Image (cartoon, helix red, strand yellow):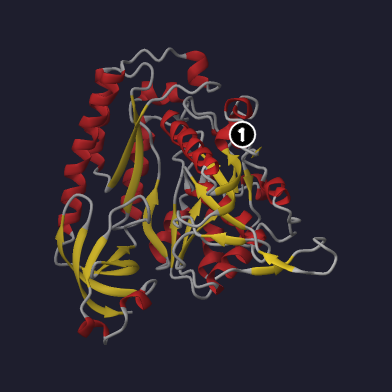
Amino acid sequence: MTVLRKMKGTDGKGSEVRMETVRTLTLGCSKNRVDTEHILSQLEGHLEIIPEDDLESRADYLLLNTCGFIGDAKEESVDAILDAVELKKEGRIGKIFVFGCLSQRYEKEMPGLIPEVDAWFGARDTDPVVRALGVEPSGDAGTRRHLTTPGHYAFLKISEGCDRRCSYCAIPFIRGRHRSVPMEELEAEARLLAAKGVRELILIAQDTTYYGLDLYHRRALAELLDRLSAIDGIVWIRIHYSYPDDFPEDVLDRMAADPKVCRYMDIPLQHISDRVLSAMRRNVDGAWTRALIRKMRERVPGVVLRTTMIVGHPGETEADFTELLDFVREARFERLGAFRYSEEEGTYGAEHFKDEIPEETKQRRWDELMQEQSLISLAFNQSRIDTEEKVVIDGFSDGVFVCRSEFESPEVDGEILVKYDASAFGGAEPYSLIGEFMRVRITGADEYDLIAEPLALV
């Protein structure tokens, strides 16, 4: 159906014309997704928004939100821009606007390299993007969202930027210094999301545990959890991107006591060797890290820990890597991802270290680490067989519900697959149940996903 709107200033008579269309493509992390959703919320009613997964409809504008964090992400972003240029040549896209971390990081170089792009914007240029589309930014843009996730969960970005200077990371000079979003704004945004039907909030930032230090001169994540938990309609609150240095232990108290706060913690540790942690400028050592993990498991029984590690950082020896493997076996993280070190210009590591470890060595270490982790993940999933869990229904495909428990975060963790049985759901149409919660019994598992049978909606 063609969408019409009255275009101001077209012919002076208020004649109706076809509404211009806009499609977005968001690359990189969930923080980028929130930026895209804030922009789209201001375009509602002014342009027709084409869903990201609709690749057939012609778009007058493509907004491409890029990632510029590490080499693989930069390559993916450049490839996506070049693909968009081809679509523009074919007439399937009108104009290409590129924003985000890649264009922020290479603001001087990119326009000359890919001149077919109509406009380039930085990572913090949300208002200029909106104005370029002929819309005046609104004062409440920070709390409004046009969701691009399934309607029952949303990411909530509680701060921007980072004050840390880890050796491998370019984020501080791309995103700037740490800036917390005031609690009142986050509450307002969360209430609007709950009114839209959002039932799970996933708190994100460059470092969620740093939240509040700039505004309130204290770590205020636990207080924020209390305020968000009081919002009607919110069932789960999940925490991502927590830094181990000076971890606020009152957050563990909330996690243990509040059923809305998922017993799930994403805490990127990066390494365990004192030598490597010092070179990475992580401000913690191995003893601190081990003590923190023990404390989390003791104070929040049943907590699931997700972490990331980096292999091949300059100076990492075979002994350092062996210590890392031993630590992973000891800590038994339920979820673990890993990166091969990538030298990034402008970072402390690029300026002070030589990236001398061969790529084949980095790859071997990565393979060994992930093989070890697959065994740990499999053992954890198998330990859940014959247990009952509460899950949320994320989707439905080929007669199967795709679900998650509080122990799985969307987009990064495995899934719980439940076969649809009409008799178990009173004959309800399966797509109508997306976003609902139910009790299931786990019946099977591999290292990533689980199989379960439905018990009852809750």
Locate residue 216 relative to residue 243 in the image: left or right.
Answer: right
Q: Count residues near mark 1 (Cα–Cα under 10 Å), then give few for <14, some for 14-19, many for 20+.
A: many
Count of picture labels:
1
Residue at 53% across / 38% down in the picture?
A: 85
Give x and y (percent) for residue 345: 52, 21
Q: Is residue 43 above or below residue 233?
A: above
Residue at 73% across / 50% down in the picture?
A: 131
Q: Quadrant of the N terminus?
A: bottom right
Residue farthest bottom in this picture:
426
Q: Amino acid at mark 1?
A: Gln
Q: Is residue 82 above or below residue 2?
A: above
Give x and y (percent) for residue 337: 32, 40
Would residue 157 be seen by someone viewing this image from the given angle?
no
Q: Mark 1 — residue? A: 104
| Residue 401 falls in image quadrant | bottom left
Which type of secondary structure does the marked residue at label 1 adopt? Answer: helix
Residue at 54% across / 29% down in the picture?
A: 165
Judge by depth and name the residue closer to the eye, 458 or 426.
426
Give x and y (percent) for residue 313: 37, 22
Judge by depth and name the residue closer to the eye, 195 or 315.
195
Give x and y (percent) for residue 432: 37, 78
Judge by depth and name the residue closer to the eye, 194 or 184.
194
Residue at 31% across / 76% down in the picture?
A: 430
Locate residue 184 relative to residue 203 in the image: left or right.
Answer: right
Would residue 92 be seen by someone viewing this image from the given angle?
yes
Q: Quadrant of the C terminus?
A: bottom left
Residue farthest right in this picture:
12
